[in-house]
Amino acid sequence: MVLSGLCGFETVYARVALAGGFLTSVTDRFGLWGPAGSKNVAWGDMQHFLIYTAILNPWFPAVVIPAFGILVTALEIALFILLLVGFQTRMAARISAWLTPGFAIGMTTGTGIKSALNASVIAFSACAWLLAKAERYPLSVDALRKGSKSHAQVVSP
């Protein structure tokens, strides 16, 4: 099912909002918002993020946590870029929609449901699912590529 009503500029808003959520989390891990312990800083560096990752994933052996944390960070960077420019938007939105409930499960298991609700990861997932169901994505690389294909089909004999 494709949501025909969700095809205007609200998809741009959803893409930018989701991309911003990934960006702020990743930049926090790299200390761009300040060091650990600063106001409004969750981690402040990768080491603090990996400690938090271990808390949220008690089922993983400690030796796996660094690789898992780096993998998730790389995935979030890729999703940020894809969503921001609107390239492979449907796929990026679906991956986001599946990834964020994983965060919610980990947060709920490790620190309680309130942290998942505070971080809005459930709402983030819902937004990503709606974006994945959109009919088209204006102001995106996807729209440019689709327009080029349509134009090429019209022009060719």
Image: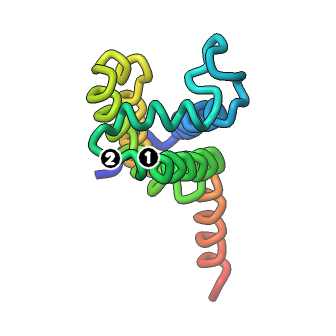
Asked if 143 appears above or below 31 in the picture, the reply is: below
Residue 65: horizontal and vertical position, in percent?
44, 46
One can see residue 17 in this view = no
Picture residue at 42% right of the left edge, 32% below the top: 124
Q: Nearer the viewer, residue 60 or 95?
A: 60
* Residue 30 appears in the rendering: yes
Amino acid carrying label 1: it is Ile
Mark 1 to mark 2: distance in Å?
Answer: 7 Å
Q: Nearer the viewer, residue 77 or 112?
A: 112
Residue beneath the point at 37% across and 48% down:
133
In percent of width and height, residue 103 lies at 37, 36
For label 1, the SS is helix
User: Which residue is identified by label 2?
Assistant: 60
Q: Secondary structure at mark 2?
A: loop
Crowd around label 2: few <14 · some 14–19 · many ≥20 (10 Å): few
Residue 15, given in percent of the width and then of the height, sits at 55, 40
Tell me which colouring the rendered structure shows.
Answer: rainbow
Q: Is residue 63 left or right of residue 87?
A: left
Which residue is found at the position 45% from the left and 54% from the top?
Answer: 90
In which quadrant of the rendered view does residue 20 lie? top right
Whether the residues at callouts 1 and 2 have beta carbons within 8 Å, the answer is: yes
Q: Position of residue 157 (x, y in %)?
A: 63, 88
Q: Which residue is mark 1?
A: 65
**From the viewer's perspective, is 3 left or right of 41?**
left
Q: Is 119 positioned to the left or the right of 126 in the image?
A: right
Amino acid identity at mark 2? Phe
How crowded pointer 1 is (Cα within 10 Å; few <14, some 14-19, many 20+) is rated as some
Q: Is residue 110 left or right of residue 156?
A: left
